[in-house]
Amino acid sequence: MDAPDPPHKDVRQHLDGDGARSRHHHRRGPCRGSSSNAGELGHTSVYLDGERCFCGNRGCVERCAAHAAVMRSARSKADDLADLGLVFGDDTVAQNFDKLARAAVGGHAVAEVFIARSARYLAAAVVSFVNVLDVDRLVLAGPSIAVAGSVYARAVRDRLVESAVARQSHGVLVELATNPRDSAAIGAAALVLQRSVAPGHGPRLVTPAATLGTP
């Protein structure tokens, strides 16, 4: 008989320019889901009347908190952000976000509004994940975290203290990844390696036909 899982469970949250993702780790390794798509935090709806997402939902984290969403909102205040030297365009989203985030951390009042809003949207989705999975440790990663990790971590911690369902039973440690920009690539490479050295334990692709139960 297998020994029971230890209480320590780990969720890694990754926020980047395209969206937000989550990976849940426990004693036996990462949880992948039936088609290796578990952890799509970016398609958790945090604003029911928000912009429609390609996934079919409205107000997904991806549409509210990711780089592109933040910069679309910031463009409406371009005059108030003129001192940051932003050049709005599809090919400058990552660079502009870095500038905006650095300014927010440095105390720029207008920049703070946009980064803080992004952090609150992420925190709203994270607390739902914590309530479902009952984890005790979160590791935040991604380009957004690399620049403004303190803002995002504070928002997540505050939301967990306020509304995590198990907050009276245990706390949730919120940490920043040591290599936040490259953590997703490192994790993906590790999964591919695991599939090579331990067949049957790596990512598994499921065809649409198999998903629908077609013989």
Image (spheres, grey):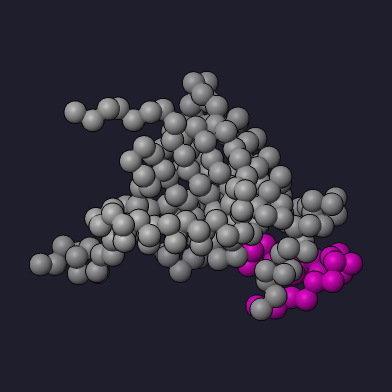
Magenta part, dominant SS: helix
Image quarter (top left, top right, bottom left or bottom right) of the C terminus: bottom left
Asked if residue 62 shows in the view, the reply is no
Q: Quadrant of residue 55?
A: bottom left
Task: Please tell me which residue lies in front, 72 or 139.
Answer: 139
Q: Is residue 132 left or right of residue 206?
A: right
The magenta region covers 61-90
Q: Is residue 55 magenta?
A: no
Is residue 88 rendered to the left or right of residue 153? right
The answer to whether residue 140 of the structure is visible from this angle is yes
Above or below, 97 against 133 in this view is below
Q: Residue at x 36, y 37 (%)?
A: 27
Residue sitting at x 51%, y 47%: 12
Residue 28 x, y percent position in the rendering: 33, 41
Please give the name of the residue rendered at 52% of the width and 36% of the height, measured from the top-left corner.
Answer: 137
Most foreground residue, 199 or 52:
199
- Whether the magenta-drawn stretch holds residue 68 is answered as yes
Find residue 96 and report its image quarter.
Answer: bottom right
Q: Residue furthest front?
A: 197
Q: Pinpoint residue 50: horizontal percent, then vertical percent.
A: 56, 59
Q: Is residue 162 above or below residue 76?
A: above
Image: 211 above or below 7: below
Residue name at image x 63 percent, y 36 percent: 157
Quarter occupied by the N terminus? top left
Asked whether, in this view, residue 75 is left or right of residue 130, the answer is right
Of residue 47 and residue 116, the one placed in the foreground of this image is 116
Q: Residue 170 placed where, x, y %?
A: 51, 24
